[in-house]
Amino acid sequence: MRTMGLDVGSKTVGVAVSDPLGWTAQGIEIIPINEEEGEFGFARLKELVEQYEVEQFVVGLPKNMNNSIGPRAEASMNYGKKLEESYQLPVIYQDERLSTVQAERMLVEQADTSRKKRKKVIDKLAAVVILQNYLDAVAK
């Protein structure tokens, strides 16, 4: 069973997928979205869901540091509801506070990636962090 991890932003969605055993997360791509025009990247997601035989989604939930739900978390939950309606697959929300910070730190420390290059991969790596945190939590 494969799980797809999503880092939902206002302009892009970072996508990661688990290996078939559900142990590791691999980054796939970044899908552009335009919420104002109602384009949520679902056509491309559908292709990826079929290609990887995804059975559930893990959507990053960017809670505020005080654990409250703010506008970005509400937007992620709305995206998750649209996923459930579109694919009839379960959606799990994973607290993603600081996942982008963690992903950026990984890029700087391990790969010494330039700021320009980081912008191109940060959402995909954040999706990997979100999904891997979920996989690690359910493996315990």
Image (cartoon, rainbow, N blue to C red):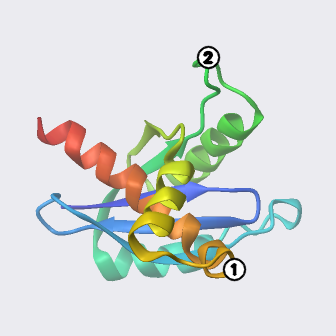
Q: Relative to the observer, which residue lies in front, 127 or 42? A: 127
- In the rendered structure, the answer to whether residue 19 lies left or right of residue 92 reads left
Q: Relative to the observer, which residue lies in front, 16 or 39? A: 16
Name the residue at the right extreme: 36
Tell me if label 1 and label 2 are in contact, CB under 8 Å: no
Query: Where 129 falls versus 75 (above or below)?
Result: below
Residue 92, horizontal then vertical, whole percent = 40, 41
- In the rendered structure, the answer to whether residue 72 lies left or right of residue 49 reads right
Residue 139, horizontal then vertical, whole percent = 13, 42
Q: Which mark is residue 116?
A: 1
Q: Which mark is residue 66?
A: 2
Q: Residue at x 76, y 57 (%)?
A: 10
In three-dimensional space, the C-alpha distance between marks 1 and 2, rounded to whole angstroms, equals: 31 Å
Q: Residue at x 20, y 69 (%)?
A: 19
Is residue 77 at all visible to an observer of this figure? yes
Q: Quadrant of residue 21?
A: bottom left
- Under circle 2, the secondary element is loop
Report crowding for label 2: few under 14, some 14 to 19, many 20 or more residues within 10 A (C-alpha): few
Task: Work out whether mark 1 precedes mark 2 in sequence or the reverse, and give the earlier one.
Answer: 2
Q: Which mark is residue 55?
A: none
Residue 24, horizontal then vertical, whole percent = 21, 62
Q: Relative to the observer, which residue lies in front, 22 or 84? A: 22
Query: Where 36 falls versus 115 (above or below)?
Result: above
Is residue 57 at all visible to an observer of this figure? no
Report crowding for label 1: few under 14, some 14 to 19, many 20 or more residues within 10 A (C-alpha): few
Quadrant location of the N terminus? bottom left
Q: Amino acid at mark 2?
A: Asn
Quadrant location of the C terminus? top left
Q: Amino acid at mark 1?
A: Lys
